[in-house]
Amino acid sequence: MDGRAIVITSGKGGVGKTTVTANLGSVLAQNGCKVCMIDADIGLRNLDVVLGLENRIVYHLVDVIAGRCRLKQALIRDKRNENLYLLPASQSDDKNAVEPEQMRQLCQDLKKEFDYTLIDCPAGIEQGFRNAVAGANQAVIVTTPEVSAIRDADRIIGLLHAQQIETQLIINRLNAELVRRGDMLDQQDVIDILAIELLGIVPEDQGIVISTNKGNPAAFNEEYEASKAFWRIGRRLRGEIVPIPNFSENGSLWSWLGKKLSDTFRRTGL
Amino acid sequence: MTAIAEMVRKWFGKGDDADSKNIAKDRLRLVLVHDRSMLPPETLDALRSELIEVVSRYFEVDHATLSMDVQRTRESWALMVNLPLRRARSAS
């Protein structure tokens, strides 16, 4: 088998790389693909807790690289889906414990076994970033519609293009109400600025917070709006053409009027 | 009367300021012009040798005389190349 290795990266921290990795992994696995997620954030591991697998770690990425265990021993099979695996990061080492060439070899080995290898990249553009992208065929850049996140995304896109890695964008935490009011950049604004292919938009959703609290990715709970977005993104990743809904579009006049009225009542305390 | 006018303005989504997203967009554009112009030296070296390669297909050039510079202004940046030509290559 020759699977794909996709790095999830952003430059800026806190924009949702780990959440995107966990949810895309969950979606692809539920679609019947064999998926391995690598937490490449050595020293600051988090993908394990987002997935609720923190109590099952025996060996980790650095153990595998250092030859202290076999790759199969370090892989944790997800309890919800047998297609889904996690290779956790070490919590005690630092980024320099791994070299880009070693990551390239690891991804090579994983691609033989898995349809998708998703690499959760640490924030920043230093050694951790270089390691995380070393073995990737393509990259998913995560940004939020904010000045700081977009600026860092632009930097990352430049670095990835120099390495000839294909890039696509996910806009995370889009707030439709703010976009409608003209107080948040919309998808077209972000695309105009970054000049990159859009893979999907994930709306801001309290369901993500609840899911993370429970250690059960939103993608296992299909009623959340964010979850629906991740399912669409999963289908696009697999090559299907799925339209991207316009979250900022105004609905009918009546729904607009209803919303404005309820907003006004809420503001005035009626 | 002004209270009603204010309420109407709020209803139609226009506050006191221009839409803040346009401010964000303008600021980003400016910041990125500067960010993107910080070219790593390897990129400039690669560009230099490829430029010489392409121009050499059509003209005889003296490699040593090529001067290249990236110039920045507030709104834009430009690549300035000065490459004296000796003579055109023959059509064959």
Image (cartoon, rainbow, N blue to C red):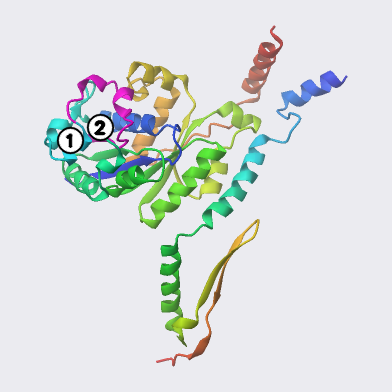
Residue A247 image position (x, y, % from top left): 53, 31
At mark 2, the secondary structure is loop
Residue B23 found in image quarter: top right
- Position of A249 compared to A122: left or right? right
- Position of A242 compared to A110: left or right? right
Residues tagged 1 and 2 counted as in contact (Cβ below 8 A): yes
Q: Earlier in the sequence, mark 1 or mark 2?
A: 1
Quadrant for the C terminus of chain A in the image: top right
Mark 2 surroundings within 10 Å by alpha-carbon count, few (fewer than 14), some (14 through 19), many (20 or more): many
Q: Which mark is residue B7?
A: none
Identify the chain of the residue marked 1, using the numbered disc in the image. A
- Position of B60 compared to B71: left or right? left
Let me know if residue A240 appears in the view: no
Residue A141 image position (x, y, % from top left): 42, 42
> Which residue sits furthest top?
A270
Q: Which mark is residue A90?
A: 2
**The disc labelled 2 sits on which kind of residue?**
Ser
Q: Check the image and report above or below for B85 versus A32.
A: below
Total marks drawn? 2
Check residue A48 for magenta coloring: yes
Q: Residue beneath label 1, please?
A: A63
- Position of B80 compared to A219: left or right? right
Which residue sits at x=32%, y=35%?
Answer: A41
Let me know if residue B24 appears in the view: yes
Q: Which residues are magenta?
A: A31-59
